[in-house]
Image (spheres, grey):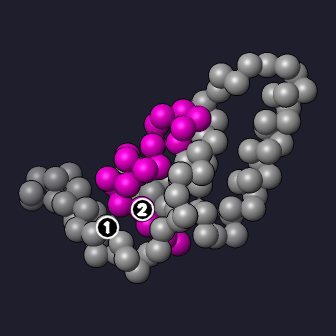
Amino acid sequence: MPIVPIDVVQNTCLHGQGQKQCRYLGADLSKSHIFYCLKTMQEKRLIDEEVSAWLNIRLAEKRDNEHITPLGDNCAGYNLVSIKAQFLKEVQALEAAQTGEG
């Protein structure tokens, strides 16, 4: 699964920015500093279906568009090979900071 570098999570995926956040950004539930790009994975279709269904419900209820569900489609997706080295450096730095070794 393509792992997304922290700077991309903030600047491209727009993590934590409500509906602007990329809908394909996944997070590791056991490690809060690891994020995944699900756009090129099988999960993409399911995510698109869920977002479409959610929007249809909102329209049927005639609610405004204020919501926190991520709707963004912010890039073409990430390739694990191109980011693996950067990711490993970031994880090592975070782990060193958490253990007091950095």
Badge 2 amino acid: Val
Would you say residue 7 sits in the magenta stretch?
A: yes
Q: Residue furthest right?
A: 60
The residue beneath circle 1 is: 87
Left or right of 93 on screen, residue 30 = right
At 34% from the left and 54% from the top, the residue drawn is: 6
Instruction: Give the answer, above or below, for where 52 lies relative to 76.
Output: above
Name above or below for residue 10 compared with residue 43.
above
Secondary element type, mark 2: strand
Q: Is residue 31 visible?
A: no
Where 1 sits versus 67, above or below?
below
The kind of residue tagged 1 is: Phe
Image position, residue 23 (x, y; %):
61, 48
**Secondary structure found at label 1:** helix
Q: Where is residue 52 in the image (x, y as percent from the top left)?
A: 80, 45
Residue 81: quarter of image: bottom left
Question: How far is disc 2 from disc 1 in space, using C-alphas?
Answer: 7 Å
Instruction: Identify the residue at image location x=46%, y=37%.
Output: 16
Q: Disc 2 vs disc 1: Cβ atoms closer than 8 Å?
A: yes
Please state if 53 lies on the left or on the right of 22 as rendered: right
| Percent position of residue 98, x then y | 20, 52
- Asked if residue 17 is among those painted magenta in the image, a careful observer would answer yes
Looking at the image, can residue 51 be seen? yes
Question: Which residue is labeled 2 in the image?
Answer: 4
Q: Specify the segment rendered in magenta.
A: 1-21
Q: How crowded is mark 2: few (under 14 residues within 10 Å), some or many (20 or more)?
A: many
